[in-house]
Image (cartoon, coloured by chain):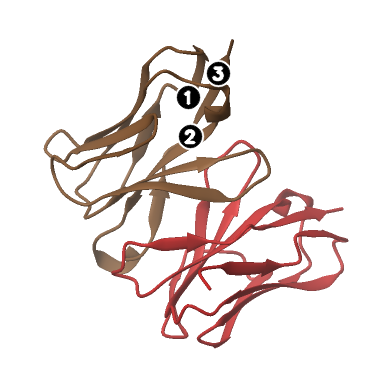
Amino acid sequence: DTEVTQTPKHLVMGMTNKKSLKCEQHMGHRAMYWYKQKAKKPPELMFVYSYEKLSINESVPSRFSPECPNSSLLNLHLHALQPEDSALYLCASSQALQNEKLFFGSGTQLSVL
Amino acid sequence: ELKVEQNPLFLSMQEGKNYTIYCNYSTTSDRLYWYRQDPGKSLESLFVLLSNGAVKQEGRLMASLDTKARLSTLHITAAVHDLSATYFCALHNAGGTSYGKLTFGQGTILTVHP
């Protein structure tokens, strides 16, 4: 299994909603990443977890809350988002931070109304 | 801060022609990636280049790395319509508190037409 699985594929939420994005891998990878990609822009790093510990937080607003409950799972909890948060959210994993092979999931397309 | 610049940002090619996309970066890195992205889809890994002079080829695409010039190129040979996509280069932040972060170029939107 060489896949990074993201759910849901599409999500529409209101500004007062609370929702979560889920990312799962069963490759034994110990580094997991969240990237945000606005339309026609490059992906931008949000968070990195290494061995279930938060390694990088790119000054992301607190309405985005990451969680890594175990080595296979990465969540992104969303609360009180703004319309400008609408984007494609990509999860990725690698064996470790120093490993060059990075696997991206298919993404969650988020629309905030 | 690592900066990555691609050019051109838009490329309209005729089928059968050759062209090159350039990726310049500002500080040293231990690895450089090339990705392809189709509209609304995720990133497809094309190449990872690890050392000066590295050259990798897959089908009609060939990537090279010159670490002294801080330049990578993605060369397209005899373009076909299926190559139409957005192409990103990305550099790995090799040190400091950003170790593990990929910084992407702006992307090159490639359109191949008959």
Image side of residue B29 versus residue A57, left or right? left
Kindly check if marks 1 and 3 are in contact, taking CB atoms under 8 A apart as contact.
no
Q: Quadrant of residue A55?
A: bottom left
Q: Quadrant of residue A91?
A: bottom right
Q: Nearer the viewer, residue A3 or B91?
A: A3
Whichever of labels 3 and 2 marks the residue nearer the N terminus, that label is 2
Judged from the image, the secondary structure of the residue bearing numbered disc 2 is: loop
Whichever of labels 1 and 2 marks the residue nearer the N terminus, that label is 1
Judged from the image, the secondary structure of the residue bearing numbered disc 1 is: loop
Image side of residue A51 versus residue B12, left or right? left
Which residue occupies 66% across, 38% down? B39
Alpha carbons under labels 1 and 3: distance apart: 14 Å
Whichever of labels 1 and 3 marks the residue nearer the N terminus, that label is 1
Q: Which amino acid, mark 1?
A: Leu
Image side of residue B96 versus residue A51, left or right? left
Q: Which amino acid, mark 2?
A: Gly
| Residue marked by disc 3 | B112
Q: Which mark is residue B107?
A: 2
Q: Which chain is brown?
A: B
Alpha carbons under labels 3 and 2: distance apart: 16 Å
| Residue B3, x across and y down, in percent | 33, 42
| Residue marked by disc 1 | B9
Asked if residue A81 shows in the view, the reply is: yes
Neighbour tally class for label 3: few under 14, some 14-19, many 20 plus, Cα within 10 Å: some
In the rendered structure, the colour chosen for chain A is: red
